[in-house]
Amino acid sequence: MALVCFPFKKEHIPTVLRNVEIATNHPNVSIVLLAAACSNDCFHEISKAIAAKSASSDPYPVPVRVEVQERLGVNLRPGKGDGMNSALRYFMKAHTLPENKLTAPLQRIHFYDADIESFDKAWITKAEEGTSLGYDVVRHYFPRSSTDAQVTWQVTKVGFALLWPRTTLPWVQQPLGGELCFTRRVVEKLLSDQRVVRQSNWGIDTLYTFVCAQNGYSLLEAYMPQGKMHALYGGLRDLKTMLCECFAAVQSLKDEHVQSSATVHRIDPPAAVPESITSKIGYDVEKSLKLLRENWSDRQMELLTLFPSDIQDGLLAASEWPEYMFMDEDAWIRAYKVYLDNFVLDDEDWRELLFKTWVARVLNYTMRHVLRGYHVAQQANTDMVMKLHMKRSLAAFDRHKCSIDIQDASSDVQSDAPPSPESDHEGPVSTGKEFLLNVRSEQMIADEFDTL
Ligand SMILES: Nc1nc2c(ncn2[C@@H]2O[C@H](COP(=O)(O)OP(=O)(O)O)[C@@H](O)[C@H]2O)c(=O)[nH]1
Ligand SMILES: [Mg+2]
C-alpha cells in the first residue's frame, strides 16, 4: 500500500507521463500523485492527458491524482517544499477520500522527481524492499559526474560535517536527493514538525534529512547504478536560488542538537561507475568566469570586511579579474563559517556574495581536481568533508571529554563508500543538470596545474 508522488513544475510532458505509467504498473503501488507547483500550462496538459487515459478503454490500474500544491510555508518562497509537504498531507488522508477506493491507510510514500528519464520500476522496488526489511526511510543514491552535486558537496555535506560531526548526518550520501521513501510513522512526525512544514522552498530536502536523523529513524541508502538522467541546467547562475535556499536551510538549523548515539544507517555498496558518467563534465567554465565579476555593489564590498583578509582580497581581486585559486577547501570552510553567522536569505547582497564565493569555490575545485579525472575529483570531495568531519569530531570529543562513551563516537554506519573502481562497464547515462563544462584543452590545463 504505497503512494508514489512526482512533484512537478514545468517538465517535458512525455517524460512525466512515462514515469506515471511505470509507477501505476508497479504491484506495490496503490495510488500515484502528481504534485503540481501551480496551475500552469504543464499542469493543464498533464491533467488532460491523465483524464483521457483514465476514461479510455485502457485506464491506469490504480488512481492517478493531479493536485496543485497547498501554500503551507509562511515566510519562505513557495517551491518544492510546499509541493512535497502537500503530498505528505494528501498521503495521510488518501484513504478517507471515497474516489480513491482505498480500504486502509497508506503505509509508504515514495518521491521521485518528475523529470527523471532513467526512471524504471527498480527505483520503486528497491525502496519497497528496504521498508519491508523494517527501515523507516530509504533514500536512493547514484553515481553523479564530478562537476555535479556542488551544492550537495560544498554546502550540505560541509555544513553537516561542521555542525554535527558525531552524528549520522555527514555520512548521508546524497542529503539533497529527492528520490526517497518514508514510512507512515515518519510522515506523521514530519508533518507535526513546524520546521518542516514551514520549509516551502528548495531547503525541504535538507529538513527531511535532518529531521529524520534527529529523530533517530533508521535509514537505508539504496544504490541505483544507472544514475539519474534528467533535465539540464543552463549554467551555474540557474543554481543561485537553490544554493542560497539550501545554505539557509542548514543555517536555520545550526543551533539544533542531534543525538550522537547510534542510529541504524546502512549504505548499499556502490558499483563501478559507467564511463558515460566518469567522462561527463558539465558546466561552461568560460561563462562561469564572468559570473565572478557580475553584480557587485558597494554594500557587497562592505560585507566583505566580515571575512578573513585573504578571502576579502581574493574576492575583491575576482571582482576585476577572474580569480579563484584562493578559494581552496580551507578558505571555503572559513568563509562558510562567516556565512553561517551572517547570511540573510532575503537580502540580495548576501545572496549574490554567497553565490560568487561558491562560484569561486566550484572553479577552484574544477581546475585543481576535476581536470585530473573523475576519481581524483571524487576523492577531493570526500577528503574535504572527511578531514573536516574528523577534525570536528575530535573537537566535539575534547569539549565533552571524559563523559564520552566510545560507542557514542560515531553512528552505526556500515561504510563511507569510496568512489568505485574504474571499469569498462557501459551503462545508461546519469548526470545531473548542474553544469555544462566546456573544457577545450583539458590535458594542457591539467599539466599546468601539476606544476603548481
Ligand atoms: N510541486 C513542485 N515541484 C517542483 C517545484 N519546483 C521544482 N519542482 C519539481 O521538483 C523536481 C526537481 O526539480 P529540478 O528542477 O529537476 O531540480 P534538480 O533535479 O534537483 O536539479 C522536478 O520534478 C521539478 O519539476 C515546485 O515549486 N513545486
Ligand atoms: Mg531534475
Image (cartoon, helix red, strand yellow):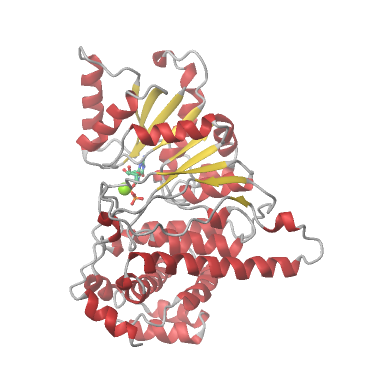
- Regarding residue 361, the answer to whether it shows in the image is yes
Q: In the image, is residue 134 above or below residue 420? A: above
Direction right: furthest residue: 402
Q: Which quadrant of the figure contains the C terminus?
A: bottom left
**Where ligand 1 lies, by image quadrant?**
top left
Residue at 58% over, 46% down: 265
Residue at 37% over, 39% down: 112
Q: In the image, is residue 174 above or below residue 24? A: below
**x, y percent for residue 334:** 52, 76
**x, y percent for residue 267:** 51, 47
Left or right of 353, for residue 309: right
Seen from the viewer's position, the closer of residues 420 and 257 is: 420
Q: Quadrant of residue 392?
A: bottom right
Direction front: furthest residue: 424
Left or right of 393, for residue 299: left
- Number of marks in picture: 0
Left or right of 79, for residue 267: right
Q: Quadrant of residue 297?
A: bottom left
**x, y percent for residue 65:** 34, 25
Residue at 39% over, 81% down: 315
Q: Quadrant of residue 147?
A: bottom left
**x, y percent for residue 46:** 24, 31
- Regarding residue 347, the answer to whether it shows in the image is no
